[in-house]
Each structure stands twice: as structure tokens, then as C-alpha cells.
Image: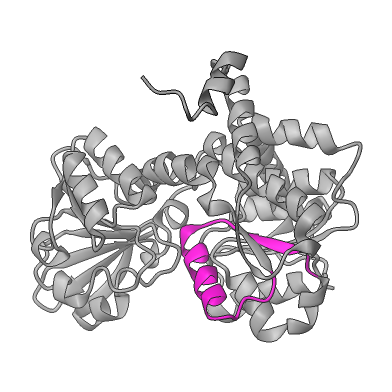
């Protein structure tokens, strides 16, 4: 197995400072590290991970190792790797295969390297590792206790595999844990998308019209942040319940066809292709900015944008200007990839503390129970969700009420009425 492949191992010292900083804002994960460092319950487990190589991910990787696991890692997006963090992991003897700016061939080569470890567990963000394993390395599946999936797009993908009878080992949908989607997706995405937008464009959001494509948990967080920064917010949706919720949350709701001429900034988070197409771009304002917070770079149809373009150039960090044949300029953030990571630094450490604590607990649970499970998609255990939230509250100095014994009896006394 290749030892590692990163951009520049000389960046390790700077990467270590970033990881140390993240640790100070991830107290729940650090609690789990301290708790399991002596007993090492993951000893004998080999974890192949495919998840954004950020300072927060490094804290997860080193916590898994502290609990006894062997870990091999690749990034899950060509533009999301922090080369300093990757170097720091490599310098700490982690087989890591990731660098910023991968092409497609290099991206999948990196995943292949992690599978040379013959994993017993997988940890994925977007399901590319899971799909590669099924498509090219079925011989490894009998070794597997299970895997986990971090993001909405990946969960959609593995559920489709399960429904088609194609999923061959158990996967825990960590994305669907309350301590993940209610916090990471809403508050993490909401804040980090605007961090990426502002780093790349330096615009003033106040007074702008921001169009949010999709009103799932991520879209809700983005709409909330846009409103808080002083924007008028339009939401587009295909789900009538979510559309109704967006309207009652105070946002305009309409078709993308109708929103396209009105928006100054367009941000998508749907997990679906062609949310913004060439037909929409043809009627957009001169200077409109397009960005995507969904996992894959398909929500904004960049080939159709390019077909309308006479000149393309990079004008700022992670901001490309497309001068259209009619003279208008359209700006695309982060090449249409995850704007919060391609143009920014990703979610704040304190919110990833919840998600990655849940990831750690999923590995623990699967190592113990996975061999007894049939292939399929499994929900994150409720008791682990509750414990993660309780620990987070404790680190914040917050205490909450508990039911009395009488209240516990009352909750089960179904015969009691008025």
C-alpha cells in the first residue's frame, strides 16, 4: 500500500496547528477520544474513509485511531481538501490520499488506495467509496461489518441502491441523525455557504435578492442566513409541503423560471441535477452569481452555461466570470462544487463536533453489531443521538429538566384522560 500522497508534506506543521485549533472547539469528540483511548474498542477494525479532508475531519480520524482503529483516508470532493491538514495527517502516519484540485481520474485513484487496506468498516460522504467498492471490489464485501454515510445526497444514493437490491452490506444513515441534520445541515451549511460566498465574491448581501433552490434542512439554513444578512429571499421547491413551510416561514415561493429574472444570487441545495439551467441563465440579470451547496457539481448546468459563453476567466479566488455572447456577465462560485468548501473553509468546528461524534459512534455500533445485520440502510440509534446532544449541552454549561418517576408512569398510563 502506498504510504500516502498529498500536495506537500512540508505543510504538516501548519496543518497540525489547524487541527489543534479544531480540537479546542470539538469537546464531545475529544471526550470520546479520552473515554476510549485506554480500552481501544475499535482495535482490529480497518476503516476506509472518504470524506472532506478538513481540520475537523482530522480530529475524527485521530479519534478513531485513538480508539484502536487502523484508518486510511481520501477526500470526497476534488476541491475540498485542505492541503495543510492532509500533510499533517500524513506526517502522523495516516495513509491519506488527497490534495486540492484533483481531476476525476486522480479522485478515484485516491479512493482505490484506501481500499487496499481491506477495510472492515467504511465511512463515506456522498457514497463514492461505497459505490466503488460495490462496482470494482465485491471481493472485499465479506470482510465488512458495515459502513456509514454522512450526507443527504449519499443517503439518497444508498437508499436507491437498497431499493434496487444492489446494496450488499449494512450502511448507517448518519446524515439522518437528529444531531446531524438539525445542526450540521441547518446551522453549519447556512453559515458556511455564506462564508464561501463572501470570501469568493466580497459582495454585500443586504439589499440583494437571494434565490434558494430547495428547502430541505440545508436550504432552510441558507434562507435563514440570507434573511439575517438583509436579503430578500425567494425559495424554489418541488415538494409542496416544503414549499408551504417556506412560505409560512416568510419567504416568497415560486418556480425557478419565475425567480430567474429576479435573483442577484442563486444558491442550490437539492441533491438533484439541472436546478439552474441554460434557460434560466438566459433571463438572469447581468452580474448574477451562481453557487451550489449540494454534494455534486450537477445542480447548476455548467455545460449549458458554457454554451452561452464567449469568454471565461478566473477573476477572484473560487470565482469564475462567464461573459455571455449577449454581453452579460454571470459568475460561478467554486466551479459549481460545494461552495462552502470550494470557496470557504467548510462548517465551523463546533457544529461538526456533533456530526463527527455521531460518525464515531456509528463506527463503534457497527463494529459491535454489524455482522448480525442484513444489507440495508439503518437509522442512527436514538439513544446515541440523545447521548451526543446531552454531552454537547454539558460542554456548553447547560442543564435541562428530567422526568420525575411520576411523569414516567403518566407517560405510559394510556387509560388516563381528563
User: Residue 326, image x and y in percent?
Assistant: 8, 76
Q: Is residue 411 left or right of residue 10?
A: left
Residue at the location (58% across, 38% down)?
A: 354
Q: Which of the pair 382/24 is nearer the observer?
A: 382
Residues shaded magenta: 144-169
Q: Quadrant of residue 227?
A: top left
Total numbered badges shown on the rendered structure: 0
Residue at the location (56% across, 18% down)?
A: 403
Quadrant showing the C terminus: top left
Residue 358, compared with residue 27, is above or below; it is below
User: Residue 60, image x and y in percent?
Assistant: 69, 46
Q: Is residue 96 left or right of residue 269?
A: right
Q: Quadrant of residue 35?
A: top right
Q: Which of the pair 45/173 is nearer the observer?
A: 173
Residue at the location (69% across, 50% down)?
A: 362
User: Residue 231, image x and y in percent?
Assistant: 18, 40
Using the rendered image of the protein, determine whether residue 113 is visible from the camera's viewpoint: yes
Q: Quadrant of residue 214?
A: bottom left
Residue 299, compared with residue 237, is above or below; it is below
Amino acid at each position: 500500500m502506498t504510504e500516502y500522497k498529498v500536495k506537500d508534506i512540508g505543510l504538516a506543521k501548519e496543518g497540525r496547528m489547524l487541527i489543534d485549533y479544531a480540537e479546542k472547539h470539538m469537546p464531545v469528540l475529544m471526550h470520546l477520544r479520552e473515554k476510549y483511548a485506554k480500552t481501544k474498542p475499535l482495535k482490529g477494525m480497518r476503516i476506509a474513509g472518504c470524506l472532506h479532508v478538513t481540520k475537523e475531519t482530522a480530529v475524527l480520524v485521530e479519534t478513531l485511531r485513538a480508539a484502536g482503529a487502523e484508518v486510511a483516508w481520501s477526500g470526497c470532493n476534488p476541491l475540498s481538501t485542505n492541503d495543510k491538514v492532509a500533510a499533517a495527517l500524513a506526517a502522523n502516519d495516516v495513509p491519506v490520499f488527497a490534495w486540492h484540485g484533483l481531476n476525476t481520474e486522480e479522485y478515484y485513484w485516491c479512493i482505490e488506495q484506501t481500499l487496499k487496506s481491506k477495510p472492515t468498516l467504511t465511512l463515506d460522504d456522498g457514497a463514492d467509496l461505497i459505490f466503488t467498492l460495490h462496482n470494482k471490489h465485491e471481493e472485499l464485501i465479506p470482510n465488512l461489518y458495515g459502513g456509514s454515510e454522512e450526507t443527504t445526497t449519499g443517503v439518497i444514493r444508498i437508499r436507491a441502491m437498497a431499493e434496487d437490491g444492489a446494496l450488499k452490506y449494512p450502511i448507517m444513515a448518519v446524515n439522518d441523525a437528529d444531531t446531524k441534520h438539525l445542526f450540521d445541515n441547518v446551522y453549519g451549511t447556512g453559515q458556511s455557504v455564506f462564508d464561501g460566498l463572501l470570501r469568493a465574491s466580497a459582495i454585500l448581501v443586504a439589499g440583494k435578492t437571494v434565490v434558494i433552490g430547495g428547502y430541505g434542512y440545508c436550504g432552510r439554513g441558507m434562507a435563514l442566513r440570507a434573511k439575517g444578512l438583509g436579503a430578500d429571499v425567494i425559495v424554489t421547491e418541488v415538494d409542496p409541503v416544503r414549499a408551504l413551510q417556506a412560505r409560512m416561514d416568510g419567504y416568497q415561493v415560486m418556480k425557478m423560471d419565475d425567480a430567474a429574472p429576479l435573483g442577484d444570487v442563486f444558491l442550490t441545495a437539492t441533491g438533484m441535477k439541472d436546478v439552474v439551467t441554460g434557460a434560466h441563465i438566459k433571463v438572469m440579470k447581468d452580474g448574477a452569481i451562481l453557487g451550489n451547496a449540494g454534494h455534486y457539481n450537477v445542480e447548476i448546468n455548467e455545460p449549458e452555461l458554457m454554451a452561452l459563453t464567449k469568454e471565461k476567466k478566473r477573476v477572484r479566488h473560487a470565482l469564475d466570470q462567464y461573459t455571455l455572447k449577449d454581453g452579460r456577465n454571470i459568475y460561478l462560485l467554486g466551479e459549481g462544487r460545494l461552495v462552502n468548501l470550494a470557496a470557504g473553509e467548510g462548517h465551523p468546528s463546533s457544529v461538526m463536533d456533533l456530526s463527527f461524534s455521531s460518525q464515531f459512534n456509528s463506527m463503534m455500533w457497527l463494529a459491535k453489531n454489524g455482522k448480525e445485520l442484513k444489507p440495508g440502510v439503518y437509522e442512527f440509534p436514538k439513544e446515541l443521538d440523545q447521548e451526543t446532544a446531552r454531552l454537547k449541552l454539558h460542554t456548553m454549561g447547560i442543564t435541562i429538566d428530567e422526568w420525575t418517576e411520576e411523569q414516567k408512569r403518566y407517560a405510559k398510563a394510556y387509560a388516563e384522560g381528563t
